[in-house]
Image: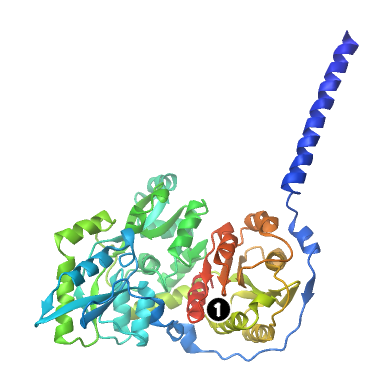
Amino acid sequence: MLNESNNKVILKIIGAAVVVFVLVYLAITIIGPSEGSLDDIIEDINVNTVSHPMGHVVISPNLDDSLTENLPEISNYPPQVNNSTPTYIEIFSSTEKAGSGADGWLTEVARDFNSAAITIDGKQVSVRLRGIPSGEAADYITSGKYLPDAYTPSNELWGEMIISKGVKAELVQERLVGNVAGILLTKSKKDELVDKHGAINTKTITDAVANKELAMGYTNPFASSTGLNFLISSLYTFDSSNLLSDKAKSGFESFQINIPLVAYTTLQMRESAKSGVLDGFVLEYQTYANTPDIRYYEFTPFGFRHDNPMYAIGELSGEKRKTLNEFVEFSQQEKYQTLATEYGFNGFNEYQSETEPVSGDVIFQAQKLWKEKKKPICAVFVADVSGSMMGEPLNNLKDSLLRGQYYIGEDNMIGLVSYSNDVNIDLPIAKFDLNQRASFAGAVNDLQAGGGTATFDGIAVAMKMIQEQRAADPNIRPVIFVLSDGETNKGHSLDDIRGIVEDAGIPVYTIGYNANIPALQAISSINEAASINADTDDVVYKLGNLFNAEM
């Protein structure tokens, strides 16, 4: 009986082992083999190191200080509402109120205004409304490339900046509709900081970040109203009497070095927050109110109010000025203020700014300080030189890299990889000093198109270069920029490297040239980076903003 019992146990064990073997076999056969290591993938790639002659570099102060030279044509921002009469005014508006749906409050006001058959001095008048991000609209105005009759940014910081640049801009209305910027924190982190510091405000946040108690993100202050507000408010906490003093600069540097993410867009910031990478981030209340999936973050207002002021731009004729005044008065009707509240505006009306007014000159200097005090990064550009990029796409890619490089600070480390059937290391990683800039320019100029498209092989090689650089300097902040049309037909797949990219935590930004944008977005989404659709006339402006955010 004992032997029979033992035999039954042995048979059960063998049977279980057979089942496990069959399941494993089926998993490998149907699903495919498990993902290999980065070294395994690199072994399958033909990698060449290519030498290039140095290129010519012209240091352009204008490009270094401003993006205005590369502004796209205004046609890139078609009007949300077109004028309905020959007599009209044109208004630039921030996008959270001049879009559609809950972001279309001013759009609806403008449409109704145009339908109301309002007459001034015997003429029927109307408005043309363009939704443009506040920072980009300010660039159009200060450059003189395109001047509207009126400008309503999210907050008065942009108004102060254009006035300091010599633009004639008169504040017509301090508040079209109420809004505030806020710090969003998870409940557990908020409770922890309240217990330690007593309250949540900008001072609490900057201290917590400097002490490595909080992983905080914010948006690019060259482009984002909330990011600019946070920059100025942070400097104010270090020295309220002089935002540019040595004390303020030192405090800001200790804070900024511990910031894990400065996002290119609000969308990128929100996706990073949803992934759990951040304890907190900044956002306008109106956006928060209309985004239910981030409500587990708690909102605390900070800094300057975002009350959507209205400015008259330039020397308006009496007719245009009366039209603007009439439009402002029209927007203040109870009907439209009630609509604004429904769309998430007019929250936190009791909140008062915790900072004093700041001049435009100081704001410009603060932006420059921010650029100087950012933690340097280690970036590898991965350029698609396959046959599908031949002609205009590759020419645009090269032009955007050659002109976009001027927004990259010299303290960053830069490398360049190109790929078609194989992968070329065109420029090993090195500090972006004048020699490296010249080598970068030479390598970019030398790029030639032909062959297949092994995008993920190119990304793998870039990751290997960064991995080796990390071994020498574990504190580097790595980034990869992929410039491509998005079509992959050679080498490894996204599934082959997804887990490796995820584990490495390297954000992969993608810039598409006549591209399959969803394919590029799939790459960028792995670590919540941004994907840019590079229209031929505004790609340098977009890259400039991206490099300002990252480098």
Residue 165 higher or lower than 421, as above or below? below
Question: Whole-percent x and y of residue 446?
Answer: 69, 85
Taking the image as shown, residue 364 lies to the left or right of residue 22, namely left
Above or below: residue 186 compared with residue 65: above
* Residue 64 appears anywhere in the view: yes
Q: Which residue is mark 1?
A: 409
Circle 1: element type:
loop
Number of marks drawn: 1
The kind of residue tagged 1 is Gly
Percent coordinates x, y for residue 130 in the rendering = 32, 74
How would you rate the neighbour count of disc 1 (Cα within 10 Å): few for under 14, some for 14-19, many for 20 or more?
many
Q: Position of residue 534 (x, y in %)?
A: 52, 75
* Residue 523: quadrant of the picture: bottom right
Q: Quadrant of the N terminus?
A: top right
User: Which of the 4 quarters of the picture holds residue 511?
Assistant: bottom right
Q: Nearer the viewer, residue 402 or 16?
A: 16
